[in-house]
Amino acid sequence: MPSLNSEQIRIYQEQGYYFPVQALSEKETTEFRVRFLDHLAHHRSRLAGLAPRDQYIVLSETHTYLEWVYQIVSHPNVLDAVESILGPNLLVWGSRWFSKMPGDKAYVSWHQDATYWGLRPPNVTTAWIALSESVPENGCMRVIPETHKGGLLPQRETCALENVLSRGQEIAVEVDESKAVDLVLRPGELSLHHVAIVHGSNVNLSGNPRIGMAIRYITPDVVQEGPEAPLAILVRGRDEYRHFELMEPPKANFLISEAAVPPAVERMMKTVMPANWRPSDRSPSV
């Protein structure tokens, strides 16, 4: 692979997702996993004081200040797969690490990304890249096929602390879980899913970590309303629209202090969260 053929593209368009796609070599996967675990270790005390829903401060938009993460989001194999869906001009709008270590209580409720992101038209796809095995036992992502076709469902904001989603948002109507598909991935594989598909993931009940990153790709014609121009990085092709403020890719790995909020994270939160939103600290013992 990793470019999708016509049948695989049809499956994505019909079902709202496609998996698996081999993206990273074994050597690359091992190297990136070690680097991610180092990132967690560097921010261990800060993460311990944040509920899962607020850990985006450390775990999101790392591609804007860590060169090794930018290597992942701009990897030719990843971009080839995404180009199969979105075409030759690609922006990275955002990224978020989703790690569930043994004993974590973190989960992701059923939701649709399109409800809160405000991206129009919906020329958006997420590449979820596994750096560890991602299986039902350790809380792999699950999707409800074809739900990207039916419009946006009502959602409620629970602000549940263990919900990884920043608002704790969840579908406010019954979801038929009998139709759910587990997106099982081996280390180095990725899945692609549509911005409007209903998806979520359960708690890690195994003794093994689940480590992955969601990368949100858009086409340059997409518009996002907000108080400030949204940020993006051009990773392939051209941007003739200039709807986003284009950032330069990081040339090194910049360490963020324990008290700082990375600029790209702050800008993203101003765009997608309420004006008075602040992260909720919690003690490490909770």
Image (tube, rainbow, N blue to C red):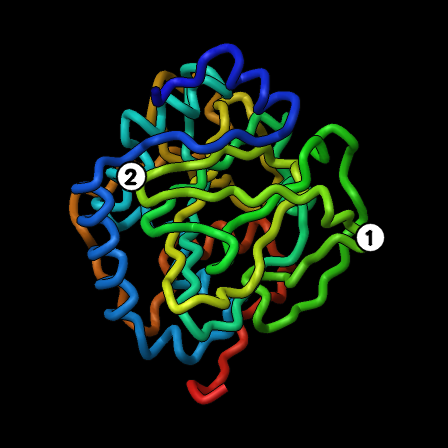
Q: Which mark is residue 174?
A: 1
The image quarter in which residue 63 lies: top left
The tag earlier along the polypeptide, 1 or 2, is 2
Q: Secondary structure at mark 1?
A: loop
In this view of the protein, can residue 61 be seen by the observer? Answer: yes
Relative to 178, 18 lies left or right: left
Is 236 rendered above or below residue 224? above
Position of residue 273 in the picture relative to residue 133 (left or right):
right
Which residue in the structure is indicated by mark 2? 72
The vertical placement of 210 against 130, above or below, is below
Q: Position of residue 182 (x, y in %)?
A: 56, 45
Marker disc for residue 250? none
Q: Residue at 30% x, 32% y: name it.
A: 74
Mark nearest the camera among 1 and 2 is 1
Rendered residue at 72%/62% (across/down): 157
Mark 2 residue crowding within 10 angstroms, few (<14) / some (14–19) / many (20+) = many
Residue 13 at x, y percent in the picture? 61, 21
- Cα–Cα gap, marks 1 and 2: 36 Å
